[in-house]
Amino acid sequence: MKKLILLALIGTCFGVQAQSSQSAFKTGEWLKFRMHYGFLNASFATLQVNSATIDDKPVYHVVGHGETTGVASWFFKVDDTYESYFDKEDGKPYRFIRKIDEGGYTKDVEINFDHNASKAELNDKKNQKKLNFTLEDNIQDLISAFYFLRNNYKTEDLEIGKAITLKMLYDDDGIFNFKLKYLGKEVLNTKYGKVECLKFRPLVQSGRVFKEQESLSLWVSNDDNRIPIRIKADLAVGAIKADLDGYNGLKHQFKIIMD
């Protein structure tokens, strides 16, 4: 679902630095976003941080879910789930799951990462097809990137106009370089009050989903949580906006500017 993908891409909005000694999130964190498509409240998307184990190793298990609601679901019904299992210490992904149903267009994909062997296997369950990839350093999946980079950047090192590159493995594109630009600080009016944000502009692929290469803008809270506050995108057809609509279990106090 392109709406949920917009949320996952927020993870690429941070410049990578040495591992921070202060984690930006914890088990139990829950974020909810309201998606607007034109005048419609098109859907909701959520991101939930859980704990799990893979091969007896403790990991974070993040579940992202998005679905259309109300009038929008009459025209185009969507029910998408993305999952990522990644290391609690260094953020390396171990498993990525993508199950989507977008108006009858379905996908059921699982990627398993073997970092010791520097390889990953993609299992396309719907089409009964498997692909193998050679892993590169600091590789992330679509969801784990969000949480890895929340712990691995310094705001003072970001340079306005400078492009940042992140390597990601995704089932549609394989391993690719995702580039974005930092545009500076901006204060947004939200349902919670005024929030100081860091603004970014990822360079996305134009044509199929996005109108132009610089069609997507993202705002991330300039506090210790580094959570997404707003997303705006010009799509090939229409425009979409997502706002933080609910949260729970934040590790740090959510900073609101008091007038």
Image: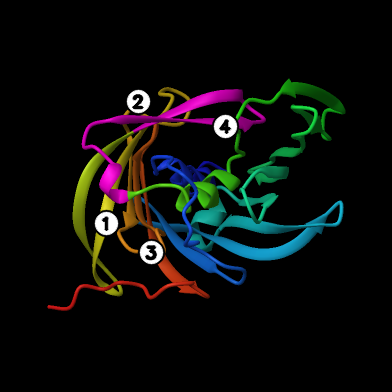
* Coordinates of residue 112 in the picture (x, y in percent): 78, 38
Which amino acid is tagged 2? Gln
113 left or right of 259 in image: right
85 to 15, vertically: above or below: below
* CA distance for labels 4 and 2: 18 Å
Find out whether the residues at labels 1 and 4 contact each other: C-beta distance under 8 Å.
no
Residue numbers of the magenta segment: 155-180
182 left or right of 205 in image: left
239 to 46, vertically: above or below: above
* CA distance for labels 2 and 1: 22 Å
Sequence-first tag of 4 and 2? 4
Q: In which quarter of the image is residue 128?
A: top right
Q: Which mark is residue 224?
A: 3
* Coordinates of residue 39 in the picture (x, y in percent): 33, 55
Which mark's residue is nearer the viewer, 2 or 1? 1
The residue sitting at the left extreme is 259
* CA distance for labels 1 and 3: 12 Å
166 to 51, vertically: above or below: above
SS label for mark 3: loop
